[in-house]
Amino acid sequence: MTDFASTRNLHRGLTRASYHRVMRTLFAGLALATMLLASVAAAAPGAAPEYVRKTSGPVLSLAADGDRAAFIVEGRVKECWSVMVWQPTRRRIHRLQSAAACESNDGPNRRGLPTVALAGTRAAWLWITGGNNLETIISSATVARPKPVWLAYGAASDGVAGTFVRRPVGDGPLLAFTSEMHCHPDYAGVVCPPGREPGDITEATVWRVGGSGRCSSPVSSGPVRCSVVAKADGELSVLAVDAGRIAARTESGVRLLTGGGRLLREFPVRASAAKLSGNRIAVRTADAVEVYGADSGDRLDRLSVPKAVRLEDLDRDILVTAWGGAVTLRRLGDGSTTRIGAGRSGLAQLERPGLFVASARRVTFMPMREVLRRLSG
C-alpha cells in the first residue's frame, strides 16, 4: 500500500520542477523573440546597418574622402598617437603610423594636437614638436606605401618668429597646405618690414601635392613631390578643398582658387573655418555659420549659432556642425535637422557614401540612405 504523504510530496516536487522548466522555457522564448524583433527592425525597409570601429584611445582628429576615413588615436603616452585609414564597408583598416614605437622611446617632445587630412588613399598629418624652436611638420603616407615621409617642415624661434606649416586639407586627388613666415624685430633674419607688426605673416605659400618640385622645405623626404599654387605677402591659409578648388583665408576674407592657382572669387568675410561642396561654401564667422554661392558670391543662408559650435562639414545641401555632445545635420533647402550623439568632443565628416562620426574611443559610419532617412523622419 502506497503511503499517501509520500505520494503528495512527490507530486509537489514534480509540480515545482515542471514550473521551473516552464518558466525557463518562457524566458528563453521571450529573449529569442526580442532578438528576432531587433533583427526584423534592423532589416526593415529604409534602415541601414551602422559600422563601428573601436579604438584603443581617444580620437584626436578625423578626415574622410569617399568611403574612407583617416583618424588619429591617442596612445597610452599622450604625446604618442597612431594614424589609421578605415574602409568600413570593406572592413579594411590600414595603420600608417603606430604609437608603439613612440611609447617605447618615452615619447618625443610634442606640443599641440595633431590634425589629419585624407585625399583618396593618401593621408597627411600635421604634428608639432620642439624645444626652444617650435617645429611644425607634415608627414604623409598612402595605403599602398604606409611608411610615412615628411612633406613639409617649419621652425620658429620661441614659436613666434620664423616658418610654420599649417594643417593639410584633402579631397579626391587634391591635397593642399600652407607654409608661412612670421616676422619679429627681436630675431635676426625675420625682422618685420615697414607697416608690419611683430608676429605678422609676411610671406605665405599654398602648396599642393603632385608635380616636380620639392615639398615646401629642404628637409622634406621621400619620393613625394609638390607644386606651388599661390603666394601672398600676407595670410593665405588653406581652409578647405573640393573638386579641384581651394578655399584659403586672407587678411580680408576668403579666396577661392583653382588647383593651379587661378582666382575664382573673393568672399569679404572673416572666417575661422570653411567647408566647400559643389556650388556652395560654408564659413564659420564669429557668431554664425554663413553659406555662400561659390559661383555667384551671394549669401544663401545664415545661421546664428553660439561660439562653441564647430563647423564640421558640408556635402551638397547638408550642413554638419557639432556642439554639446551632438553632431547636427541640417538640410539647407527645407531646414530639416537630425542630431546624433557624439560625446563631448565629437568629430564628424560627411561624404557621398555616408557620415563618419568619432566619439570617445570609437569611429562609426552611417550609410547615406540612413542619413537621408533620419533627415526625412
Image (tube, helix red, strand yellow):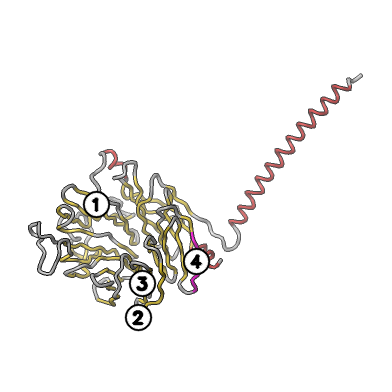
Instruction: Give coordinates of residue 122: x percent, y percent.
Output: 31, 58
Residue 274 seen from this side: no
For the residues marked 2 and 4, what is the alpha-carbon distance in whole angstroms? 26 Å
In the picture, the quarter occupied by the C terminus is bottom right
For the image, the number of numbered tags is 4
Q: Residues within 10 Å of mark 1 (few under 14, many from 20)?
A: many
For the residues marked 1 and 4, what is the alpha-carbon distance in whole angstroms? 37 Å
Farthest residue to the left: give it. Answer: 188
Instruction: Give coordinates of residue 35: x percent, y percent.
Output: 62, 49
Q: What residue is disc 2 on?
A: 296
Tag of residue 128: 1
Of marks 2 and 4, the one in the foreground: 4
What is the quadrant of residue 292 in the picture?
Answer: bottom left
Instruction: Give coordinates of residue 184: x percent, y percent.
Output: 12, 60
Of marks 3 and 4, the one in the foreground: 4
Q: What residue is disc 3 on?
A: 281
Query: Residue at (19%, 56%) from the top-left corner?
Result: 153
- Picture layout, residue 122 above or below residue 236: above
Q: Please give left or right for residue 271 compared with residue 129 in the image.
A: right
* Residue type (three-letter) at the residue carrying disc 2: Ser
For marks 1 and 2, the one nearer the N-term is: 1
Question: Do the residues under discs 1 and 2 have CB atoms within 8 angstroms?
Answer: no
* Residue type (three-letter) at the residue carrying disc 1: Ile
Query: Residue at (34%, 54%) from the top-left corner?
Result: 143
Q: Residues within 10 Å of mark 4 (few under 14, many from 20)?
A: some
Query: Residue at (25%, 63%) from the top-left corner?
Result: 177
Q: What residue is disc 4 on?
A: 337
For the residues marked 3 and 1, what is the alpha-carbon distance in whole angstroms? 29 Å
